[in-house]
Image (cartoon, coloured by chain):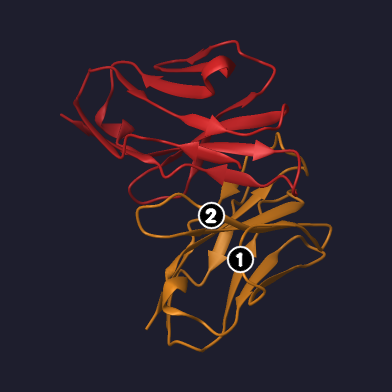
Chain colours: A orange, B red
Amino acid sequence: ETGVTQSPTHLIKTRGQQVTLRCSSQSGHNTVSWYQQALGQGPQFIFQYYREEENGRGNFPPRFSGLQFPNYSSELNVNALELDDSALYLCASSPAHGAREELFFGEGSRLTVL
Amino acid sequence: AQKVTQAQTEISVVEKEDVTLDCVYETRDTTYYLFWYKQPPSGELVFLIRRNSFDEQNEISGRYSWNFQKSTSSFNFTITASQVVDSAVYFCALTLLTGGFKTIFGAGTRLFVKA
């Protein structure tokens, strides 16, 4: 069983640029969530996707957007990058859509904004 | 407002010591789920346990045990006879049924277990 995979693992961008991060959910998992983890902090919820629609969003501006595809994989897009966007971006999938479902995390994409 | 507080930023113990990681949460919702996750030094977060708000029964799994007390809004995690492999960052998390099943994480407690 393949776990959650994310790409790229590391990337460096400059302020104002745009970035796309990709996530393949664990086999059979239909719900994908994205989190931002700043250094020394806990993950912060960005948004969740279920059946290709956004289903819940944290306190992140509209320049953070996403997609979920029919195969349940997902993308996180961030426009107009700011220095504070430097963080580890975590994708998590869950086997069903519900509050009781545990999250299965990928290893993350570390974004550095210069 | 919903919040998870892990007051202990770092804990250092010697192998075989017992250690308790504290977690206090805030929510006005009556139905919710609580979780603990482990993040090893180089690896992804891994699920450890889930508790729903109506189940205050404590749980033991090997050297791990969890104490959920709704009256104090706490969900503490104890490792008995700690081992070096327990060294990691541990996160407590709260998931609500409203707002798209948003999961709120605490800031984490970094546990160092020395040989």
Q: Is residue A71 left or right of residue A1?
A: right
Q: Position of residue B23 (x, y in %)?
A: 45, 29
Three-letter residue code for mark 1: Phe
Q: Reply above or below: A79 against B84.
A: below
Closer mark to the observer between disc 2 and disc 1 = 1
Q: Quadrant of the C terminus of chain A?
A: bottom left
> Reading the chain from its start, which is encountered first: label 2 or label 1?
2
Q: Position of residue B109 (x, y in %)?
A: 35, 38
| Chain under numbered label 2 | A
User: How many badges with numbers are in the image?
Assistant: 2
Name the residue tied to disc 1.
Answer: A60
Three-letter residue code for mark 2: Gln
Q: Position of residue B39 (x, y in %)?
A: 41, 44
Between A14 and A95, which is closer to the camera in this rendering? A14
Measuring 59% from the left and 51% from the top, which residue is drawn there? Answer: A3
Q: Are marks 2 and 1 in contact (CB under 8 Å)?
A: yes
Q: Position of residue A70 (x, y in %)?
A: 82, 64
Give neighbour class at mark 2: few <14, some 14-19, many 20+ (Cα, 10 Å). Answer: many
Residues flagged by tags 2 and 1 on a common chain = yes
Tell me the SS state at disc 1: loop
Q: Can you tell which quarter of the image residue A84 is in?
A: bottom left
Measuring 45% from the left and 49% from the top, which residue is drawn there? Answer: A42
The residue most toward the top is B57
Using the image, tell me which numbered label, if any, was put on residue A44: 2
Measuring 45% from the left and 87% from the top, which residue is drawn there? Answer: A15
Measuring 20% from the left and 23% from the top, which residue is drawn there? Answer: B15
Q: Is residue B17 left or right of residue B55?
A: left
Q: Reply above or below: B66 against A6.
A: above
Q: Reply above or below: A104 against A59.
A: above
